[in-house]
Amino acid sequence: MYCTQNDIIKRRIPEDDLIQLTDDNDLGGVDADVVAGIIAEQDELIDGYLRSRYELPLAEPVPGLLTGLAVDLCVHALYSRRAHIEIPESIDKAYGNALKRLREIQQAVMKLDVAGVSTSSSGASFTANERVSGRNKMTGIL
C-alpha cells in the first residue's frame, strides 16, 4: 500500500472534505471502505507503472515520493466519484503531475531509491525461432 487514509487527510484534504466525498449513506463519517477501495485501485495503477522497472511489492518503507503520488491519485479519484462536485484545479493539476512522474519513473528518467531494481529495460522481449529457409538451406532444391 502506497498511502493510507491518514496520509490523504494529513497531506491533501481535510477530514470534513473526505466525509463529503465518501459518505454515500449520510452517516456523518468517512466511509473507510470507499477510501480503501480507492487506495487499492490507485495502488494497482502505480504498480502498472513500476512493474517494468522494479520488483514488486517494493520493500518497506515505501519512498515518500510514491506516497505523495498515491495521495494525489486517490484524491482525484475521490473527487471523480462526485459528478456534482467540480474537481478543484489544484487537485486536477496534482493528478496530472503524478501521472507524469510515474511515466518518468517507468522510463527511468527518475529513479526510486529502493531495493529490487529489475534488470529488464523495457519489460518486453523478443525471441525468434531458427530460420526455416535461407540461402544455405535452399541449396539443391531447384
Image: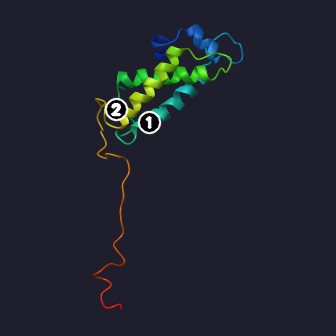
Q: Nearer the viewer, mark 1 or mark 2?
A: 1
Q: Nearer the viewer, residue 85 or 67?
A: 85
Whole-percent x, y for residue 72 in the image = 48, 21
Q: Is residue 46 visible?
A: yes
Q: Quadrant of residue 79?
A: top right
- Give the mark, 1 or 2, whose residue is nearer the N terminus: 1
Q: Nearer the viewer, residue 32 or 64?
A: 64
Q: CA distance from mark 1 to mark 2?
A: 13 Å
Say the numbered circle drawn on residue 47.
Answer: 1
Q: Secondary structure at mark 2?
A: loop
Image quarter of the N terminus = top left
Q: Amino acid at mark 1?
A: Asp
Say the numbered circle drawn on residue 139.
Answer: none
Please tell me whether residue 95 is drawn above or below residue 133 in the rendered image. above
Q: Is residue 2 visible?
A: no
Whole-percent x, y for residue 8 in the image = 49, 16
Whole-percent x, y for residue 78 in the image = 58, 21
Q: Are marks 1 and 2 in contact (CB under 8 Å)?
A: no
Q: Amino acid at mark 2?
A: Ala
Identity of the residue drawn at 34% across and 32% down: 59
Please tell me whether residue 118 is drawn above or below residue 19 in the rendered image. below
Neighbour tally class for label 1: few under 14, some 14-19, many 20 plus, Cα within 10 Å: some
User: Count of labels shown?
Assistant: 2
With 27 as the anchor, is 6 left or right in this view?
A: left
Q: Nearer the viewer, residue 68 or 32?
A: 68
Identity of the residue drawn at 31% across and 36% down: 108
Neighbour tally class for label 2: few under 14, some 14-19, many 20 plus, Cα within 10 Å: few
Say the numbered circle drawn on residue 59.
Answer: 2
Image quarter of the C terminus = bottom left
Identity of the residue drawn at 47% across and 25% down: 96
Whole-percent x, y for residue 29 in the image = 63, 11
